[in-house]
Image (spheres, rainbow, N blue to C red):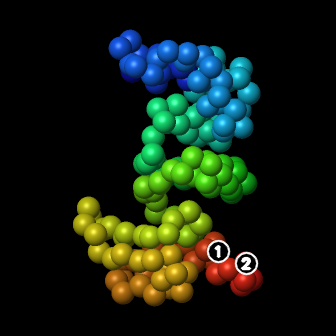
Amino acid sequence: MPASTLPHPVGTPGDPRAGGSDTRVVKALEDVGLPATFRFRYPHQLSGGQRQRVAIARALMLEPSILLLDEPTSALDASVQAEVLNLLDRLRAERGLTFLMVSHDLAVIDHMCDRVLVMQHGRAVEELAREDLAAARMTTDYARSLFDASADRMLAPAGGAA
């Protein structure tokens, strides 16, 4: 597949959302904190955090109510990861979005999710509320191993020390 610039999701012939696409592209970039000039850049011209913001902008141009976020911060350093998570939090609040997040990083899940479904080999093995995750109330060894791998970066419960 050839490299594409940001307008492609709404520039597809026959797509009813294609009208006014340049305005929509600029708005989507602004929504994720990038300047309008980024609409002409190719992926190899962007940093990892910028690529992630552009991916989010592309998805938002389609005006979804649900976003599937597959390891949205896995290749980012800690400071850029925090920026992207804060951006996602803001966009969720502003747009009333629902996120379906796939991640092996329970610190990210703890920060972003109200409920957790732990899967192993494509099967659900445990479902946890955010409070259960924060209190380390897991019943399966697999969920416990994921928790142990991320526990040092988990957020403290509200009112607790970080």
- Looking at the rendered structure, the secondary structure element under dot 2 is loop
Q: Quadrant of the N terminus?
A: top left
Cβ atoms under marks 2 and 1 closer than 8 Å: yes
Closer to the camera, 154 or 22? 22
- Corner quadrant of residue 117: bottom left
Q: Quadrant of the C terminus?
A: bottom right
Closer to the camera, 24 or 69? 24
Q: Residue at x 66, y 37 (%)?
A: 31
Q: Residue at x 38, y 19 (%)?
A: 15
Q: Residue at x 47, y 54 (%)?
A: 99
**Residue identifier under label 2:** 162
> In the orientation shown, which residue stands out farthest toward the top?
13
Q: Determine whether, in the image, residue 24 is placed left or right of residue 77.
A: left
- Looking at the rendered structure, the secondary structure element under dot 1 is loop
Count up the numbered dots: 2
Is residue 91 positioned above or below 32 on the image? below
Residue 152 shows in the view: yes
Classed neighbour count for the residue bearing mark 2: other residues with Cα under 10 Å, few (<14), some (14–19), many (≥20): few
Q: Earlier in the sequence, mark 2 or mark 1?
A: 1
Is residue 68 positioned above or below 138 on the image? above
**Residue identifier under label 1:** 155
Give the x, y percent position of residue 90. 65, 52
For badge 2, the amino acid type reads Ala
For badge 1, the amino acid type reads Leu
Q: Residue at x 51, y 50 (%)?
A: 97
